[in-house]
Image (spheres, grey):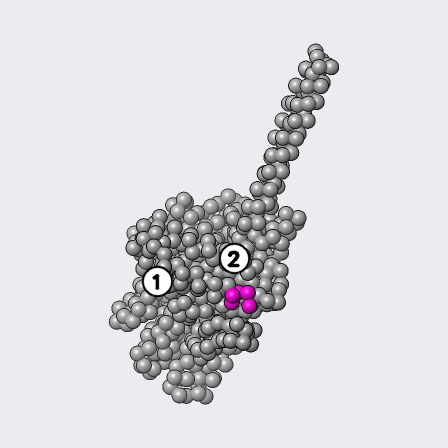
Amino acid sequence: MGKTCSILISFKNKAYIILGFLAVFYVNVNSQNQKRADSLELIYTSGNFKEQDRLKILKDLAYDHADPDKKLTYSLELIQLATELDSTKYLWNAYTMQGTALRSKGDYDKALESHIKAVQIAIDEKSNTNLGKAYITIADVYSVMENHSNSIDYYHQAIDILRKENDSSALAGALYNTGDEYVFNKKYDSAKIYFKESSLIFKNINNLTGSAYNLGSIGLIYAEQGNYALAKENINQAITILEELQLYTPISEFLIGLADIYIDQNDLITALSYTQRSLELAQKYGLKKNISESNQKLSEIYQLDGNLPESYKYYKDHIAYRDSVTNIPTVQKIADQITDFEVQKKEDEILFLEKEAEINELKDKRHKTLTYISFATAFFILLLAVGTIRRYRFIKKTNHIIQEETYKSERLLLNILPEETALELKQSGKVQAKKFDSVSVMFTDFIEFTRFSHKLSPEDLVKSVDFYFSKFDEIIEKYDLEKIKTIGDSYMCAGGLPFPTTDHTEKIIQAAFEITEFIEESKKMDGKKIKAFEVRIGINTGPVVAGVVGTKKFAYDIWGDTVNVASRMECNSSTGKINISEYTYELIKDKYDCEYRGQVHVKNKGMMKMYFVNGLKKTEV
């Protein structure tokens, strides 16, 4: 088994971890948290407390309790009481912890609803600190759903806000989670940068939870790089600390990480022991996501050992728990709610600016009118003619300026959004998320970009990336494709939207070949001016949901399993190659010469068929 697919894991309990970092509540998270929760629970159930302390006790119970069911119970009670008492401070805490508990139990759709309510409260209260923390929790849910581009976007927004607010604990949590996202995308150098900064902050504020997670994450990177001794040492240190803190969800995930290391070392007995321990913890505390992943790992171990009946048994349990936490229609509904929420905010800002401009224009007109009247009294005939001429010129000039500014605004909007989406935004003030049944998605990535970037000056690095991405923009425009976004050195585009077409798969293949040809031609250029990079490309075809997201800037984006599989195709591609999924292959196999690569193991997907596209078949030339 290759270590690249087996060892790499991404933590799904981020929201719970982050809440331990929020300095507004606790500076130090240690093993006394659960003891404090047990003590408070006895006081609360006995009724031996003052009524004015009920809100604070419920908030502390919701934050301290390690059991997600208990956390959910106390957060629900806190919501009811805070609503009755009109306490927005405690209501924000309650919705945040409710979302955390629901996410821990695998109810991602309901978790998103709770976190969106927390965002709205923070905006209404003008609390940037709480807004930054709420963005973290939304990013955490996107991470669990494996929408890593959106997850990173929200983490970066949270980091920008929290740096200005000088909230060290929450900032450290956001930095750590961002590093974890880069680990998932195999950008280990970037991950280490974020882990290093978060580790220093955790150490300064004596945050044992954060230190434990940094140890474990660095251990996983060591495992990916084949240094198993350091990997085991770091992960075991992390588990020891987490056991003292009674944080069982991350322990369950770290145990799976250790099991993967022993699988790579062909020690299936030890791997089985760690995985069974992970499953026991997950079952004890009702952690559905962890139960699913532990069953999947047990199925994998028994398959490697040749015990197919046991492997099948655990695989069935994995599927059952996986399906119990996956609700695609509901998640799509939540994505629509987020889109409506973000667009409504932008619409309110636009309306405010328009009203302000309208008031200023009315004041200006009133002033000019009074001036005309005063002159008309003394020089009625002469100034009436002059006033008429001036007014005509003014209106003509103003209309010209308005037309120019309107044109500029429309062009700017079309540079950000597809034409159909921009038109919908102008007409209705918001954009409804839409589902497309067949879309082709392409990812490109420069090989060893991080290593080369250290050798280039910032100016040369930006110049090189702009050189390549500008040409990519020309190519996808040539084939009527839609650019979605760039993240670092990764370029993402799609065909078949915002207007459905029947030839999007063939067009995106043609664009991919033109990109590889451009990359080869670029190698002949003067390397002193533009750095020559190698590229790998991945393509997948299937249904997606498209819409507009963002709180400060509009961003047209797409979601769905099709996007995730396309990203996996790029990660598993080779230098200068176009790697496609089985779904895409079925659409182009009659026209293009494709090389079957066999079945390749893909994280969270299992074995998937992949193909390299070599070119048009000879009969098509």
Instruction: Kindly identify the residue that appears in the image at 62 percent across and 54 percent down.
Output: 420
Residue 170 is covered by the magenta coloring: no
Q: Alpha-carbon distance for marks 2 and 1?
A: 23 Å
Q: Position of residue 215 (x, y in %)?
A: 31, 63
Numbered mark located on residue 483 in the image? 2
Quadrant occupied by the N terminus:
bottom left
Say above or below: 106 vs 280.
above
Q: Is residue 418 left or right of residue 101?
A: right
Q: Is residue 249 left or right of residue 120?
A: left
The prevailing secondary structure element of the residues shown in magenta is: helix
**Which comes sooner in the sequence, label 2 or label 1?**
1
Q: What amino acid does circle 2 point to?
A: Lys
Q: Position of residue 171 (x, y in %)?
A: 39, 51
Q: Nearer the viewer, residue 293 or 495?
A: 495
Say above or below: 54 vs 580.
above
Identify residue for label 1.
Answer: 448
The residue stretch that appears in magenta: 506-510
